[in-house]
Image (spheres, helix red, strand yellow):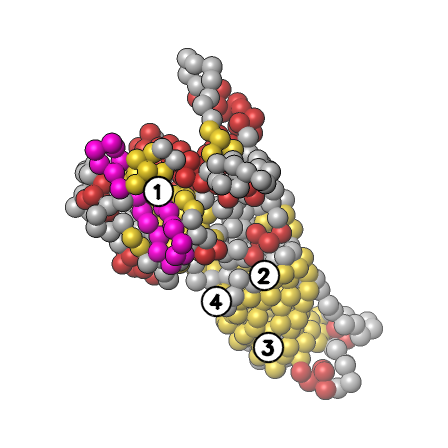
Amino acid sequence: MKRRVFYFLILFLSVRIFADSFIDAIQDLAVRTACIGQYSMTEAGGGWYDDPHDYYTPQTIASRLASESGNKTRTLTFYGICFDYADFAHKYIKENERYFQSVGMYERQYWIAGVHGNPGTIILQYPGTLNNYTTIQNGIYVKIPEKGGYKPVVTHNKVTHHAWIWIKRADGVWFWVDPTWTDNTGYVVYGYVHNGEEVQCRPDRKYCVNYVQKLDSLPLPPEMGQNIPSSSTVNSTDREKTIQDATIENITNAIRKAKVTGIDYNMRDEYISLLIATDVPFSSLKEKLSFDKVGIGLEMPLLFNSVAIIVGVEYIQKIEDDDSLYAGIFEFDFTKRLFNNVACYIGGGIGIQNSLSSAYKVDAGLILNISHIFTKVEVSYNNVLGLCVGTGLGIGLDF
């Protein structure tokens, strides 16, 4: 058999159902609010501009609204600014507290979040009354708690003069949802709080009417971790007391427990990935590209307890001897995300040679993802081929 050089495309194959029912619920909250609202540039003080495109309209969820209307045949909508979107979302959570708690909301920890001119301070607040309020927003009495309402957290995109929602998950992680930007962009704008800032997360495609390529580079939200204990205000309706459990310390500790530590860009919803790669001995490279032996691997990324690993099998082939099988190795790699689109990995494997003696491999490398294009480079050693270099190129597939 003639000597051949094997180069394979990398097709990363991984399937991930979106993080959890809580993440689904808050994305649905953003969409429902966006459908009910329409943004008014005039009310925002910029009437000399046209209103932004209204991506989500009542018609988007017309059947759902009809089924929810009960014995009335109307749905009240609003035409306003960011605070109106936040206020509507806050009311919807309050009206459906039991539902949100059933899917993972922590007690009554949901707030209207706002910011003035300083993007490094977020204000948590709630609707007040005529006799108990701090300020008036669009004709609504709003109360900022006397203690604990101001949080030293940087806003998403360092936005100023804006309003949105904060909601706490049962594992202690704080999430933010921006229904105004959702309506104005056509995709869900949301995320979680980490290291003193609001981090934007990749939305689920099924909630987006305008899914753009840049969203692929956003991280997925952290996996649901272990539930934190009930607070002393678990049964309280006094917002001045429940704010005491909305602490930055809880945010930091929860992220330590729940953050995703492995590769995440190939673990997204409606995405399949399978890795086919090659190992070529350094000795072959030095012998005038004499490729008489090559390793071929088939690998799949998996997610266990928020840590991504890669498992696979590799067989080592001697081309000049009618493709005889030299060895088979079961391998696994542990990954670590370096940046949004880059992950490193290290691992190895064990197997058997055709002489029934043992085979083993150790490896390390980098994975780069740009949109749907994947590349991999690897340096490895196995006791059949010796020191090897591996490489590949391919695409990811949506379904």
Furthest-top residue in this view:
71
Q: Indicate the quadrant containing the C terminus: top left, top right, bottom left or bottom right.
A: top right
State yes or no: discs 1 and 2 in contact (Cβ < 8 Å): no
Label 4 SS: strand
Q: Which mark identifies residue 379?
A: 3
Label 3 SS: strand
Q: Residue at x 56, y 57 (%)?
A: 217
Front residue of this view, candidates 83 and 16: 83
Q: CA distance from mark 2 to mark 3?
A: 16 Å
Label 2 SS: strand
Image vertical order of residue 396 relative to residue 89, above or below: below
Q: Residue at x 54, y 74 (%)?
A: 364
Image vertical order of residue 24 relative to residue 275, above or below: above
Q: CA distance from mark 4 to mark 2?
A: 17 Å
Residue depth check, mark 3 versus mark 1: number of the one nearer the observer: 1
Stretch of the chain drawn in magenta: 112-134
- Counting residues from the start of the chain, the first of labels 1 and 4 encountered is 1
Q: CA distance from mark 1 to mark 4?
A: 35 Å
- The quarter holding residue 222 reads bottom left
Would residue 126 be visible to someone looking at this image? Answer: no
Crowd class of label 1 (few under 14; some 14 to 19; many from 20; radius 10 Å): many
Q: Which mark identifies residue 112?
A: 1
| Residue 132 covered by magenta stretch | yes
**Residue at which label 2 appears:** 299
Image location (x, y in percent) of residue 365: 56, 73
**Residue at which label 4 appears:** 336
Residue depth check, mark 2 versus mark 3: number of the one nearer the observer: 3
Crowd class of label 4 (few under 14; some 14 to 19; many from 20; radius 10 Å): some
Residue depth check, mark 3 versus mark 4: number of the one nearer the observer: 4
Furthest-bottom residue in this view:
286
Front residue of this view, candidates 274 and 68: 68
